[in-house]
Image: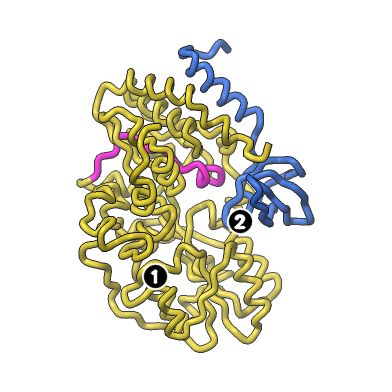
Amino acid sequence: MRVVSIEGVEAEVEQGGTRLRARIDLVENVKVGDYVLVHAGFAIQTLDEDEALETLRLLEMLGMGIQSTPD
Amino acid sequence: MALRWVSEFRNGRVAQRLIERIAEIADRECTLMEVCGTHTMAIARFGIRQMLPNSVRLISGPGCPVCVTAQSDIDRFIAIGQVDGVVLATFGDMVKVPGSQFSLRDARTYGIDVRVVYSPFEAVELARQMPDREVVFMAIGFETTAPGIALSIIQAENERLRNFFIYPANKLVPPAMKALLSFDDVRIDGFLCPGHVSTIIGMRPYEPIATDYGKPCVIAGFEPLDILQAVLMLLMQIRSGQAKVENQYRRAVRPEGNEAARRLIDEVFEPQAVEWRGLGIIEESGLKLRRKYEHFDARLTFDVQVPQAKEHPACQCGEILRGAALPTDCKLFATACTPDHPIGPCMVSSEGACAAYYRYREVSLS
């Protein structure tokens, strides 16, 4: 879910029109605009954009039938 | 883009190619277990079981927190609710689970005060608002839920809130995975490891399962491409005779996990042997409050007697939770037992295998 605003240890998070309040004191350095996993009222991790793009790149290569990575 | 990192992982063309690759290398019968209720739901919802070749079997494990909670714990929690002045607070999933006598929902008709909360902090807030009542929160869930519960205990302690209690029933996933490998009636060739639990515990706790038990482990995300890629990674390990821990869900799971969250668990709780529905008592697989926080333990404060727990004799939740039976093997499935009239917890929780099979039983390859 995307962090919309932060007030102390609480954030407002949003996904697909659903808004929730979540505690953010279990994760470090959360900023507005970050994507976080929320579980039972707590953000438990931020999503890493570089890693997401890397996984998608690998999947896309698999999709093209390339089976090994160039680097 | 509100649904970021969702639609990209649902690309049908890439999914098709992954399925082809899986079919190419699936040269032997193998059974893979998903140990997370959210995976169970995603696999049913997207019809992933039906996309895979017949030789690759996906079975569900003990990944639904409500389902694995022992009947005796549910009975005792309800009994505590009968004590004068007590308010029970619980996650919504728990309310419809049948106890030996009745469920929490039915308990309301007997005058027991049951409140549904979304997070443990709402239970703390209830305790603040009702200083003359005693609020008891049912602490279920795995490593993902435990840090938040630990934080709520610390907060209650800091506020000297003496009318807030928990019923400690949190469980730990890796000890249960090891226990599953000791059952004679279940064959598991590899594990799809739980993505959310792994954000907390990281990769290391799975190492003994790979090295000592020789079972490949892949931590997986929850979108169709995540699950298909993780299945492919497991099959590649199996085919090459390897068993190691790999991380498919790298955008969310750091190898070291979430250390701050683990420190919180460790501050408040320590491991103990606990009973799991279907799996029996497993050493070091649950969390109890450390001595310093023992005064929050509802079991020590409210001394209630409960009769021997009774489960429905025909309900196969136990076998289903350890992968020894499929929901469709149970005689009660979709006949006597439905989400509206659940007989066992696997049909109650949205993360339960029976509920997932029931809800998506019409899903086919699309």
Amino acid type at mark 1: Asp
**Residue B323 shows in the view:** yes
State the yellow chain.
Answer: B
Depth order, front residue of B191/B153: B191
**Residue B212 shows in the view:** no
Q: Residue at x 25, y 49 (%)?
A: B328
Depth order, front residue of B223/B309: B223
Q: Residue at x 35, y 37 (%)?
A: B364
10 Å crowding of disc 2: few (<14), some (14-19), many (20+) = some
**Label 2 sits on residue:** B264
Bounds of the magenta span? Answer: B186-200
Element at badge 2? Answer: helix
Question: Is A36 one of the magenta-colored residues?
Answer: no
Q: Residue at x 64, y 65 (%)?
A: B154
Amino acid type at mark 2: Leu
State the blue chain.
Answer: A
x and y, in percent, of residue A35 in the image: 67, 41
x and y, in percent, of residue B225 in the image: 48, 30
Q: Residue at x 52, y 16 (%)?
A: A61
In the rendered structure, the answer to whether residue B221 lies left or right of residue B124 reads left
